[in-house]
Amino acid sequence: MTDRIIAVGFNTAPVEGDLSLLDTRLAAMVEMGCTGAEVTVTGLDAVAACRFVPERVAELRTVMNRHDLAYSMHAPIAINLMDEAHADLMRRAAMVSMELAAETGARVVVLHPGRVAPKAWIDCQGALMQFELDQLGPVADRAAELGVKIAYENISPNARVIAGLETSYSLDPRLLAEQLQRLSHEAVTACLDISHAQQGAVLWGFDMIEACEALAPWIGHIHYSDSTGQPLDFPTTHLGEKHFFGAGDMHAPPGYGVVDFEALARRLPLRPDTRVVIEIKRNFHSHAGAATLAAAQGFARTVNAITAQGAAA
């Protein structure tokens, strides 16, 4: 049986227009044994006003083709297909993200689901969920035409969520599964962000592993990092203070939080061609990057072995 998880690697940080930094980072990933990479679209300067900058797209394609990695892309987090006031702009941004992936050989594009003000959610939940589907459907159709898949990612309780400015159904992976079921599009899978699921579970009081298992039939992409789930609802002055307290979206190596990765791996009958993307903060790379890669590779082996055993039973 073909492995469900086909690649493991890291995401790239924004390169602020310097594609030589991306080239160096991708080369380092190959050197350390990665088989995949997720390129952060923000900061590439390959798109402006939701249109290609042709010479930058060509340069980006050259850089990515230089390295033998299974690529995904993370579209701008600001894309919000539940934003009625900017509906056309958001849809165009999502469309060009699909097109950039196709132009550069990335087969998966990560998008964040819709977010709205809590009062709007209370007043108009059903209409907002349908609006998102109406926005996402044409983007998914375009992705299918291009041979690209969308990975819809469960979000974290970020600063705006904690401040009560916005909310999202996707804080709970089970609700994300229900929305993907409503859409039922061949080009749309789920991106399980493990750390986000842990944070959502603490915030909303559900069982993290059970919620991830409910999403599993839709999962075609995974973001791999650890956290405690402790909300960051107090002020900090440095990124390292988040890690010191164990609060917020830590983006930490396994063992720095409380996620039971072994138990989780045994409960995820994933979709074929799933990629695992490690998302740890830059300060961890020098002293924990190699160990985190080894842990993620072990996680992938467990998932693949359990899936193979289930198929053989």
Image (cartoon, rainbow, N blue to C red):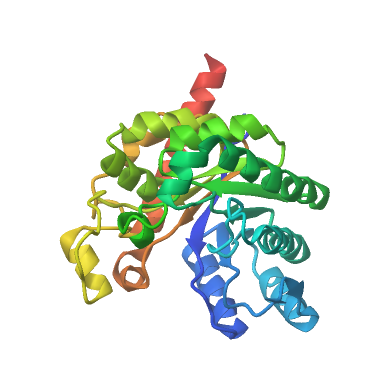
Q: Residue at x 54, y 53 (%)?
A: 112
Looking at the picture, how far across and down is residue 32, in whole percent?
47, 65
Above or below 218: residue 71: below
Where's the N terminus, which quadrant? top right
Which residue is more in the foreground, 29 or 191?
A: 191
**Viewer-side residue, 182 vs 134:** 134
Q: Is residue 76 left or right of residue 288?
A: right
Q: Where 43 sits versus 91, above or below?
A: below
Say if 285 sits above or below 245 in the image.
Answer: below
In the rendered image, residue 105, in percent from the top left (x then y), is placed at: 73, 61
Q: Residue most toward the left?
A: 245
Residue 60, position as x, y percentages in the image:
69, 76
Any part of residue 240 in sight = yes
- Residue in view at x 67 percent, y 32 percent: 184
Closer to us: 13 or 150: 150
Q: Residue at x 78, y 49 (%)?
A: 147
Tell me: 101 left or right of 29.
right
